[in-house]
Image: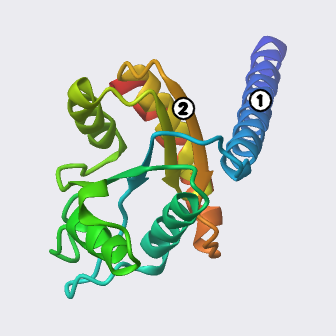
């Protein structure tokens, strides 16, 4: 009976330490993602890769998407980028191609169409990186600024490196923040390891 009790205590301690370790790791990871994503002073680069998000059926970008595009446009006006690679898919809820809407938004703000590459096959971060790398075989851009929500930056840079980008890779996060960012920040932890294991 005493032996069973000792085993039970050992199992409970192990479980408790395991859960504490997991919690600490999540806190560390979330802290790093936040720090990495909010570093918002990228050096001058060749191109901004803007990741897509929700676009409504009439082609209007949602606030998150606008935030990314406005940040990319800000970089352009500051002379930090010369070109844009806007990438997104077609959402489940809305059927308007994200990259088409993103390009139209930038053109409306005064960016010449010729400076914007639209990738409507970037249904997720991995595909955006794959499609950019295919396009970049000929374009040979060596300095890239990734533009997305702050919590998305670390995973995006990781997958670009994993897909073989060897040049200078920096980032700029959207200045649009909502309470949903907290939920998305926590979801980024399993998403990062999914990308690490699957792709």
> Where residue 24 sits: x, y (%)?
79, 36
Residue 17 in the image: above or below residue 49:
above
Residue at 44%, 50% in the rendered image? 82
Q: How is the image coloured?
A: rainbow
Residue 70 in the image: above or below residue 163:
below
Residue at 26%, 40% in the rendered image? 127
Residue 13 in the image: above or below residue 28:
above
> Where residue 51 sits: x, y (%)?
39, 54
Residue at 60%, 56% in the rendered image? 173
> Where residue 164 sits: x, y (%)?
37, 18
Count residues near mark 1 (Cα–Cα under 10 Å), then give few for <14, some for 14-19, many for 20+. few
143 or 89, which is in the foreground?
A: 143
Quarter occupied by the C terminus: top left
Tell me if residue 25 can be seen.
yes
For mark 1, give the secondary structure.
helix
Label pair 2/1, CB-CB below 8 angstroms: no
Q: Which residue is mark 1?
A: 21
Nearer the N terminus, badge 2 or badge 1? Answer: 1
> Where residue 157 sits: x, y (%)?
51, 34
The quarter holding residue 28 reads top right
Q: Which residue is mark 2?
A: 169
Tell me if residue 87 can be seen.
no
């Amino acid at each position: 009976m005493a032996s069973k009790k000792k085993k039970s205590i050992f199992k409970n301690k192990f479980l408790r330490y395991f859960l504490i370790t997991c919690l600490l790791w999540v806190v560390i990871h979330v802290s790093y993602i936040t720090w990495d994503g909010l570093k918002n002073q990228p050096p001058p680069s060749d191109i901004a890769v803007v990741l897509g998000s929700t676009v409504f059926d009439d082609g209007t970008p949602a606030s998150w998407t606008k935030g990314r595009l406005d940040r990319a446009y800000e970089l352009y006006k500051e002379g930090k980028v010369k070109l844009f690679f806007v990438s997104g898919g077609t959402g489940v809820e809305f059927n308007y191609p994200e990259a088409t809407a993103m390009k139209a938004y930038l053109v409306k703000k005064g960016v010449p169409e010729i400076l914007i590459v639209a990738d409507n096959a970037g249904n997720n971060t991995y595909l955006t990186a794959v499609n950019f790398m295919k396009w970049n075989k000929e374009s040979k851009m060596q300095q890239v600024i990734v533009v997305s929500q702050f919590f998305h930056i670390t995973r995006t840079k990781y997958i670009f490196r994993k897909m073989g980008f060897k040049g200078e890779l920096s980032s700029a996060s959207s200045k649009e923040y909502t309470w949903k960012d907290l939920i998305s920040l926590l979801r980024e932890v399993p998403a990062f390891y999914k990308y690490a294991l699957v792709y």
